[in-house]
Image (tube, helix red, strand yellow):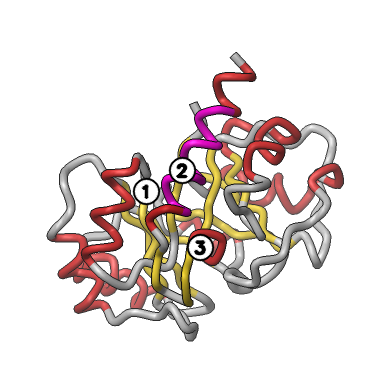
Amino acid sequence: MTRIKICGLMSAADALAAVEAGADALGFVFAPSPRQVSPETARDIIQSLPPFVTTVGVLVNRPAEEVENIVRECGLDLVQLHGQESPAYCAGFQGRAVKVLSMDQGIDMDTIAAYGPVTRALLLDSGRGGTGRTFNWRTLPVGLDRDRLILAGGLNPDNVGAAIKTIGPWAVDVSSGVESAPGRKDIRKVKAFIEQVREADHDLG
């Protein structure tokens, strides 16, 4: 079953509604963005969540010690790294790092081989997060392990089913595709997105 992450949460109401709709993971953006939250806000939201919801901090090119402080303060489960973080940097998070690779810049199996062993998963995006743009799903390198692959980039209720059937990722990640405005989730879109994921899963058997 494809896992679902709703990213760019800024309020407890949106976070709880996403969980109620069936989201497996929630993302909190600490990098400069219209969806940026403070560690204090993220901590308060996370403390309001029911158990067994995975929480993810989205960060870009921050010192490792600073990231660790945010993880501790907020109670995050994973860190999603969108910058130029090296494999050695990712390894320092001991299996809690998700490394984002930009399809706009092109990736190859050497890059995947470098990051794969030192991360929990790899996330493929069209560029910097929150652009709302897709990439050509058929350009993935041959041999890419789908079992630890998270797909992002321009996903929405209208295209996520096709994306799953084309790529077969372990998880999908959506932000702007389920919003009424930056940082404000439209619960109808969230529910529609999750319904389309489950329908695609069912069709794939």
Q: CA distance from mark 1 to mark 3?
A: 12 Å
At 85% from the left and 42% from the top, the residue drawn is 138
At 42% from the left and 74% from the top, the residue drawn is 183
Bounds of the magenta segment: 189-199
User: Which residue in the structure is indicated by mark 1?
Assistant: 25
Q: Residues within 10 Å of mark 2 (few under 14, many from 20)?
A: many
The type of residue carrying mark 3 is Ser
Work out whether mark 1 precedes mark 3 in sequence or the reverse, and give the earlier one: 1
Mark 1 or mark 3, whichever is nearer to me: 3
Q: Residues within 10 Å of mark 3 (few under 14, many from 20)?
A: many
Does the magenta run of residues contain 196?
yes
> Mark 1 and 3 residues: CB-CB less than 8 Å, in contact?
no
Work out whether mark 2 precedes mark 1 in sequence or the reverse, and give the earlier one: 2
Q: Is residue 115 above or below residue 9?
A: above
Q: Is residue 167 above or below residue 60?
A: above
Q: Main secondary structure of the magenta part?
A: helix
The dot on residue 175 is 3
Element at badge 1? strand
The type of residue carrying mark 2 is Ile
**In the figure, residue 165 lies in which quadrant?**
top right
